[in-house]
Image (spheres, helix red, strand yellow):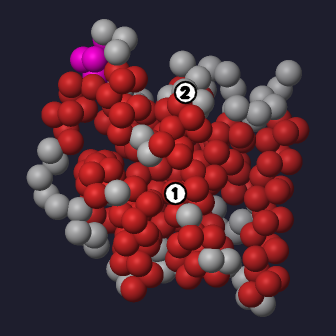
Amino acid sequence: MEYFVSEESIVRKIWGKADTILFIFAGAAAEFALNKAVDWLYFTGRLPADPLGRLFSTVEYSRQIIFSDQESALKAIDRITAIHKGVENSRGAQIPDWAYRDVLFLLIDLSIRSYELLERKLTPAEKGQTFMVFNRVGQRMGLSGLPKTYFEYLNMRNEHLQHNLVCGELTLDLYRQYKKHLGASRYAVLKQAQLLVVPPLVGRHLPLGKLPWLLPVIWTYKFLRMLKVEAFLRNALLPAAYKTQIISMDNA
């Protein structure tokens, strides 16, 4: 069977661990809130009503693509494209291509940053593999202006971060929704995770704090993982409504 992503690919290792996915989710929650096109996420009303569920659905679509055979993955990408086209038709406008690219770019970046935070540094070849997987998703979606190489992506990613982020009223509202749905303690953990994983340009726009008190917890977590008891700590921090869904993402 031909898979969309090779079984030996580092991308499968990155997206096959619930721990890594949680940090990808945390970083995405920060960057989605800052994106200039965040109004598109508010258009249907689903994001402010259930921000965690909406973001987890984005993560789950990514996993479906990464772990599916070629045909199923392409169908999943086409479904994503059709959903967005439906939103565009309802609003009578088009989502700009740069907004689509922003999502692909953040998934590449956060995949690398989260894995390196929790596991090890990736090689240039492994970073290139990660770029290629998500770039193929963008190609299937028919996006224009995609980078051709990982190094070209790095330059475009930096440009997007400099020009496409803004902390506005929708940003603040989305963070209020995060706190409402997570509760104060888990909301504090979310912001700490964001502080550790988001690019510096993202962190400057948000009140995430400067003291990374979660870092010693991660070191402890890595030690507990050696003892095979890390799931107790991780699961205690998960929102009850999403605990089963998140744990099921662990392919290890």
Q: What secondary structure is found at the residue carrying circle 1?
A: helix
Report x, y in % for residue 104: 58, 57
Q: Is residue 218 magenta?
A: no
Q: Residue at x 76, y 77 (%)?
A: 87
Asked if residue 115 is positioned above or below residue 170 in the image, the reply reads: above
- 238 sits to left or right of 197: right
Q: Is residue 159 visible?
A: no
Foreground disc of the pair 1, 2: 1
Asked if residue 48 is positioned above or below residue 59 in the image, the reply reads: below
Query: Which range is magenta?
Result: 222-226
Predominant secondary structure, magenta span = helix
Mark closest to the chain's N terminus, 1 or 2: 1
Q: Is residue 223 magenta?
A: yes
Q: In what quadrant of the picture does the C terminus appear? A: top right
Q: Residue at x 56, y 70 (%)?
A: 49
The disc label shown at residue 113, or none: none
Report x, y in % for residue 96: 65, 79
Q: Amino acid at mark 2?
A: Asp
- 243 sits to left or right of 72: left
**Which residue bears the numbered disc 2?**
250
Q: Is residue 170 visible?
A: yes
Report x, y in % for residue 86: 82, 74
Q: Residue at x 38, y 69 (%)?
A: 175
Q: What secondary structure is found at the residue carrying circle 2?
A: loop
Distance from the alpha carbon under mark 1 to that under mark 2: 18 Å
Of 2 and 87, nearer the camera is 87
Residue that sits furthest to the top in the current view: 227
The disc label shown at residue 52, or none: 1
